[in-house]
Image (tube, grey):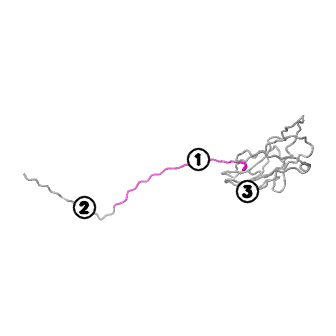
């Protein structure tokens, strides 16, 4: 028996262009952005500055007051903001040997704005040329400051208690508050 194998070839010619195939996908990305603000003293890198010591050693110190070095603060905010200032109490806390303890009001402490790179306006009575007394009531110091990173301002303290207070250490906390608009 003979076996026959036949191969039949089919040739198909095409003159058309093959279309490319594609498929699309999409995804929604949402970012939850919230308001954020942070203030820090550049000397300490934290919200708590180093202790400012105003030492009265001479008659001239008592007569004319003692001025601190610049105290620089940095604000980072994603919205415009204001800066207010106040003391934590109306009187200094006394540590010393005099009894009863003397009462020194915080208005013997004043402040000058040494520099302002916040983009905001300095609010009266504060200025870069004259010292303004502090109080335990919140006082607006800088207004409409510009949002951004590392916005700097610096202040100087001046204490002028006069000659009537006995020796000792008088302490008060000064509170700065940055508030977004």
Q: Secondary structure at mark 3?
A: loop
Residue under label 1, please give it: 32
Q: Secondary structure at mark 1?
A: loop
Q: Residue furthest front?
A: 57
Q: Which residues are magenta?
A: 18-43
Q: CA distance from mark 3 to mark 2?
A: 79 Å
In the rendered structure, does residue 29 fall within the stretch colored magenta? yes
Crowding near the residue tagged with mark 3, few <14, some 14–19, many ≥20 C-alpha atoms within 10 Å: some
Crowding near the residue tagged with mark 2, few <14, some 14–19, many ≥20 C-alpha atoms within 10 Å: few
Say if 143 sits above or below 98 in the image: below
CB within 8 Å, label 1 to label 2: no
Sequence-wise, the earlier of marks 3 and 2 is 2
Residue under label 3, please give it: 117
Residue under label 2, please give it: 12
Q: Residue furthest bottom?
A: 15
Q: Position of residue 94 (x, y in %)?
A: 85, 38
Q: Is 109 left, or right, of 80 in this rendering?
A: right
């Amino acid at each position: 028996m003979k076996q026959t194998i036949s191969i039949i070839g089919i040739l198909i010619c095409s003159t058309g262009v093959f279309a490319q195939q594609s498929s699309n996908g999409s995804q929604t990305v949402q970012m939850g952005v919230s308001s954020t603000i942070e203030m820090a003293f550049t000397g300490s890198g934290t919200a708590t500055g180093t202790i400012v010591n105003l030492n009265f050693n001479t008659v001239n110190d008592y007569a004319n007051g003692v001025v601190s070095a610049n105290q620089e603060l940095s604000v980072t905010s994603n919205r415009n903001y204001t800066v207010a200032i106040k003391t934590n109490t109306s009187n200094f806390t006394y540590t010393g040997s005099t009894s009863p303890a003397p009462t020194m009001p915080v208005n013997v402490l004043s402040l000058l704005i040494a520099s302002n790179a916040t983009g905001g306006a300095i609010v009266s009575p504060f200025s870069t040329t004259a010292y303004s007394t502090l109080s335990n009531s919140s006082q607006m110091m800088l207004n409409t400051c510009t949002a951004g990173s590392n916005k700097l301002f610096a202040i100087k303290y001046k204490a002028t208690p006069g000659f009537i207070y006995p020796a000792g250490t008088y302490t008060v906390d000064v509170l700065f508050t940055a508030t977004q608009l």
